[in-house]
Image (cartoon, rainbow, N blue to C red):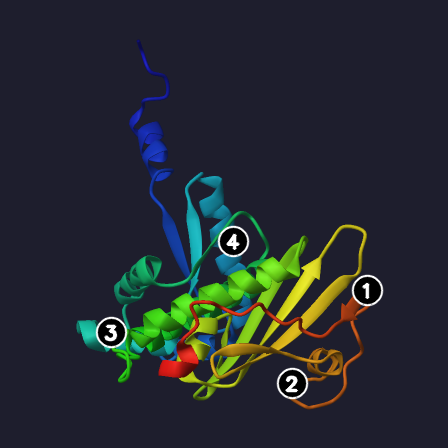
Amino acid sequence: MTRTGTTPANLRRALRREVPSTVGLLADEHDFTAMRRYRTFAFDDHTTYLRQVEALLRTLATQGGHTTVTLFDPEEYAAYCAETALDPDHPTSRSRFTAHLAATGAQVTYTGQPLSTLLPELVDTAVRHATWEYATTVLATAGDCATCGKDIGRAAFERAARLLARLLDAAGPGIHHLVCSVPAADDQLLAVLAAGIVLGAPGGLVLRTTSPGARDRLHGWRLTGGTLTPLTEAEVFAAYCTDARTGEPLSPEPGVDHRAGFPLTPDPDDDWTTHH
């Protein structure tokens, strides 16, 4: 059988489609300005830079390969260059760092979406990735319980899994969206219930349920002592209708009912408060 399109140029194009690409993106003006200290960084204007990045992404997409985008953090880049003895003011160093991010960092697949859509998705993905990395460290370094000898991190993870399973069982049918917020040092851990249990930090969990033909329902709980305590309807309303930064009231979201958290059935395997 004779293959068609097997000229050297066609073969190179076919091979290029099988090589993945990763683009490191300077998402905001602050990070862009930090990179301008390097002589070999060619851009002077962030808007122009973003326009050129978007054009590059479109070009890569037309070549048929798989393209991902990752956040390029100048501080992490400088630290990487110091650790690996690379000259930070060199394009090859930036390329190597981007390859490093492709293997270890948060990424979003480019499917033709505009940067106005891709940027928020990328930032959100990076935040979740960093949160999970921090939470993993919290669980892995919690040590053993002085009373029972159990691994505290593993016990907290198992307890969190049981809490969520009981909560979802009690929530009933519908599409459920859970958000857990736990203060940790100078930041907030989102969606990391097990880390909140290990840290013993006060936190909160909100369940939003969507069902066809019905108004959305919001229920809330307070995380204290490694367990979930239901909030009242007024507390759920206040949590959702108050600006967390300014304390100013916010207008209620239309089509949403604010409801008290419901009590969870006792956990037969629960010995957390006894030993921790």
* CB under 8 Å between discs 2 and 4: no
| Residue 40 visible from this viewpoint | no
Mark 2 and mark 3: Cα distance apart in space:
38 Å
**Along the line of sight, the residue nearer the viewer: 102 or 162:** 162
Which numbered disc, 1 or 2, marks the residue that appears first in the sequence? 2
Mark 2 and mark 4: Cα distance apart in space:
38 Å
Measured along the vertical axis of the image, is residue 24 above or below residue 66? below
- The label nearer to you, 4 versus 3, is 3
- The label nearer to you, 2 versus 4, is 2
Which numbered disc, 2 or 4, marks the residue that appears first in the sequence? 4
Which numbered disc, 2 or 3, marks the residue that appears first in the sequence? 3
Type of residue at label 3?
Cys
* CB under 8 Å between discs 1 and 2: no
Type of residue at label 2?
Ala
* CB under 8 Å between discs 4 and 1: no
Disc 1: CA contacts within 10 A as few (<14), some (14-19) or many (>=20): few
**Along the line of sight, the residue nearer the viewer: 193 or 133:** 193
Marker disc for residue 244:
2
Quadrant where the C terminus is found in the figure: bottom left
Residue 31, horizontal then vertical, whole percent: 45, 76
Type of residue at label 1?
Gly
> Which residue is pictured at 52% across the width and 71% down the height?
46
Q: Which residue is mark 4?
A: 55
Type of residue at label 4?
Ala
Q: Which residue is mark 3?
A: 81
Q: Which residue is mark 1?
A: 255
Quadrant where the N terminus is found in the figure: top left
Residue 208, horizontal then vertical, whole percent: 67, 65
Residue 135, horizontal then vertical, whole percent: 39, 73
* CB under 8 Å between discs 4 and 3: no
Q: Decide if residue 244 is on the left or right side of residue 67.
A: right
In terms of secondary structure, where does tag 1 sit? loop
